[in-house]
Image: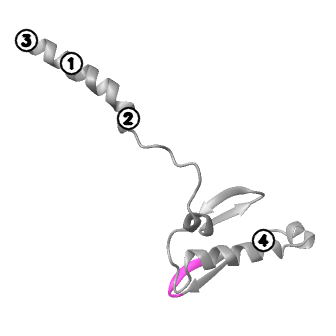
Amino acid sequence: MNRMSIVILWALALLVLQPALAAEPRQQPTAREQARTVTIFHQPVVMLQATFGQTTPEERVLRTRSALRAFTEDDIRQPLRVVPVIRYGQPGRLF
């Protein structure tokens, strides 16, 4: 076989095998990912990854869910206030 035939055979083999080598997309998030995801109206909004101070992402998600459930109509009608704070030696913002 000449060199050109070998190159063509390799190219065809790669084209045929390429879909088999691709990873299957994941359909459902893992339980850990679900516990770290803030969901509003059944839509994932953000997945928290890092630990903040001594608070795990899962604890922060629970705290966020509690705060969102505690909102009243009066809270929504008030203008948004941003308060700078320092927690665990890290600057942050409270809304």
- Cα–Cα span, label 3 and label 1: 11 Å
- Cα–Cα span, label 4 and label 1: 60 Å
Residue at the spot of label 4: 68
Task: Please provide percent x and percent y for residue 38.
Answer: 66, 65
Density class for disc 2 (Cα within 10 Å; few <14, some 14-19, many ≥20) is few
First in sequence: mark 3 vs mark 1: 3
Density class for disc 1 (Cα within 10 Å; few <14, some 14-19, many ≥20) is few
Q: Is residue 43 above or below residue 51?
A: above
- Relative placement, left or right, of 23 versus 84 is left
- Cα–Cα span, label 2 and label 1: 17 Å
Q: Is residue 55 magenta?
A: no
Residue at the (39%, 32%) spot, across then down: 19
Residue at the spot of label 1: 9
Q: Is residue 88 above or below residue 16?
A: below
- Cα–Cα span, label 3 and label 4: 70 Å
- What amino acid type is highlighted by mark number 4? Leu
Residue at the spot of label 2: 20
Q: Is residue 90 magenta?
A: yes
| Residue situated in front as seen by the camera: 72 or 92 | 72
Q: Secondary structure at mark 1?
A: helix
Density class for disc 4 (Cα within 10 Å; few <14, some 14-19, many ≥20) is few
